[in-house]
Image: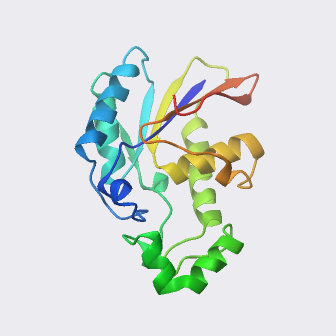
Amino acid sequence: MKIYLIRHGETTANVEKRFAGVLNVSLTEKGVGQAVLTGEKLKEIAFDAIYSSDLIRAQETARLISTHQAVSPVILPSLREMNFGIWEGLKMAEIKEKDGELLNQWFVDFEHFVVPEGESVKEMFERVTEAYNKIIEPYSKDDDIKIAIVAHGGVIQALMSYLCFGDNTGYWKFRIENCGIAIVEYVMGYPVIRALNQ
C-alpha cells in the first residue's frame, strides 16, 4: 500500500501570511498552476481512491489532480486544517498585538493549548489520525493499493508525526510545501517514508 499525502496549492492566505485553518480561502493563480502540475506528475499512478478535506482549497486541488484519474475525490470534513478560532484570518503580528499572552501560552504548550473558539493541536491530531486509520482500514497493507489524501500543512505534519513517532511530538519537525507530495509505503506492515515535498 502506498499513501500519497498532498498539500493544497498556494492560497491568498499563504501569500498574505494569514492564519487560515477552517477559514475558506481560494487558490491563487499560482496555486491552481501547482495543482495542475501535481496532477500531471501523478497521472501515471492509478489511484484506487482520492480523499480530500472539505475546505475549498483542498477540494479544488483534489479536483485538478483527479482530472487524470478514474476516481473522484471523496470529501471528508475530518481532514480539515486545525481550527484557529479567534485567530482565523489574522497575521502573526496582529495576534501578538491582540492576544500576546495567549500566543505565549500556545508556544509553551502547543499540544494542549486550545485557541479560543478553536481547537488544540492534540484535538486536531486525534481527529486526523482517526480519519487516516478509517481510510486505510478496509485494505491490507500488503495490497497493491494507492491512495491520495489531499489536505493541509498541519494535517500532513500531524500524520507524518504519527507515522514516524507514534504521537504528535514530531509535529514541528516537518515543513510541508504547497502541493508538496509525501509518499508513505507500507513494508511488512510498517510505514516507510519514501518522499517528502516531492
Farthest-out residue, left = 29
Q: Is residue 188 above or below residue 60?
A: above
On the image, the x and y values in percent for residue 3 come to 56, 30
Q: Indicate how the structure is coloured in the image.
A: rainbow
Q: Residue at x 58, y 34 (%)?
A: 138
**Residue 31 image-quadrant placement:** top left
Q: Is residue 140 visible?
A: no
Name which residue lies at 27% across and 27% down.
67
Q: Is residue 46 above or below residue 60?
A: above
- The quadrant holding residue 123 is bottom right
**Would residue 165 be found to the left or right of residue 95 on screen?**
right
Side of 162 where 98 appears, left or right: left
- Extreme top residue here? 44
Check the image and report above or below for 159 versus 181.
below
* Residue at screen point 32% across, 49% down: 57
**Quadrant position of residue 21:** bottom left
Is residue 63 shown above or below 44? below
Circle count: 0
The spot of residue 126 in percent (x, y) is 63, 58
| Rendered residue at 60%/23% (across/down) | 1
Q: Position of residue 121 (x, y in %)?
A: 61, 64
Q: Is residue 111 left or right of residue 157?
A: right
Where residue 28 sits: x, y (%)? 26, 47
In the rendered image, is residue 57 in sight?
Answer: yes
